Amino acid sequence: MNEPYSPATARPVSSTSPSTMKMFMTFLAVFIVAQTVGTVLFCLYLHMKMDKMEEGLSLNEDYVFLRKVQKCQTTEGQKSTLLDCEKILKGFQDLQCKDRDASKEQPKFEMQRGHEHHEHPRSLHKNKTFTAVEKREPIAAHLAGQMTKKTVSVLEWKTTMYGPMSDNAISYQEGKLKVKEAGLYYIYAQVSFCTKAATSAPFTLYIYLYLPMEEDRLLLKGLDTHSSSTTPCDLQSIREGGVFRLREGDMVFVNVTDSTRVNYNHGSTYFGIFKL
Ligand SMILES: *[C@@H]1O[C@H](CO)[C@@H](O)[C@H](O)[C@H]1NC(C)=O
Ligand SMILES: *[C@@H]1O[C@H](CO)[C@@H](O)[C@H](O)[C@H]1NC(C)=O
């Protein structure tokens, strides 16, 4: 009856105890390792998830900002006191400026505009500059003869009331016209002069390309020896013009065989150039 408590039955318990213990310990170790690995994996997952959420949040912020910009560009939006339109539009323009500076291109996205008269001054300014680039002023200069008493080797010129002078593309110095852009140019000149019966040498009008390092190159030449009358001044004119390919910084000038005979009456002596 008291058998259960006999040492015979107790022995198997005590003999199996170490192996159970061993199994239990092994299980515990495996469990702990699994737990640790699981925790690490979960932490990694959580971290990635947080990153994604953060990204999503910032995208959402961008979206809200763009919505605000869009609203501000409508008439109702500008009236709304909830939106600080001035600040929002300024922020948006700053962004666009950065974008343009970075790529030197037109803005990648053009917002749909509200009514024309509600346009921001900045966008008006932008439009003006764009049209200025498109409808560029022609490059041209037309000058009138500048009277000089002494004999000169290069005729001198002055601007006139209606004659153009593209100061940003053509400059004038000591009788020479200098082009800032390379290209095809029509160059022309007219000189009116007195022919005296006594002189038989032809009066010649030249247009030269000025070359500082070498001999100047003749572009155009016109001659006149006509002298039928015996009056002290038989007035005549020589006119010439032609198209030439000029390089950046090239200079052209006009000279005549005898500059003292040039007539400077209004409209009779002139020099001009324009880019084709
Ligand atoms: C730009 O200006 C021109 C006139 O200079 C006007 O006809 C045109 O509608 C303007 N464009 C925009 C987008 O405002
Ligand atoms: C006109 O200019 C050319 C080129 O510089 C020069 O050779 C010539 O002597 C000049 N003519 C006169 C009359 O000054």
Image (cartoon, grey):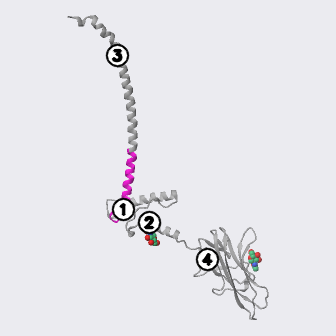
Q: Which residue is mark 3?
A: 21
Image coordinates for residue 160, horizontal then vertical, percent:
60, 81
- Position of residue 246 relative to residue 258, above or below, is above
252 or 218, which lies in front? 218
In primary-sequence order, the first of circles 1 and 4 is 1
Q: Earlier in the sequence, mark 2 or mark 3?
A: 3
Separation (CA) of disc 4 from disc 3: 108 Å
Dot placed on the residue nearer the N-terminal end, 4 or 2: 2
Q: Residue furthest left?
A: 1
Q: Quadrant of residue 261?
A: bottom right
Q: SS for tag 2?
A: helix
User: Residue at point 70% right, 90% down?
Assistant: 235
Residue labelled 2 has its Cβ within 8 Å of some atom of ligand 1: yes
Which of marks 1 and 3 precedes in the sequence? 3
Upstream in sequence: badge 1 or badge 2? 1
**What secondary structure is the magenta-colored segment mainly?**
helix
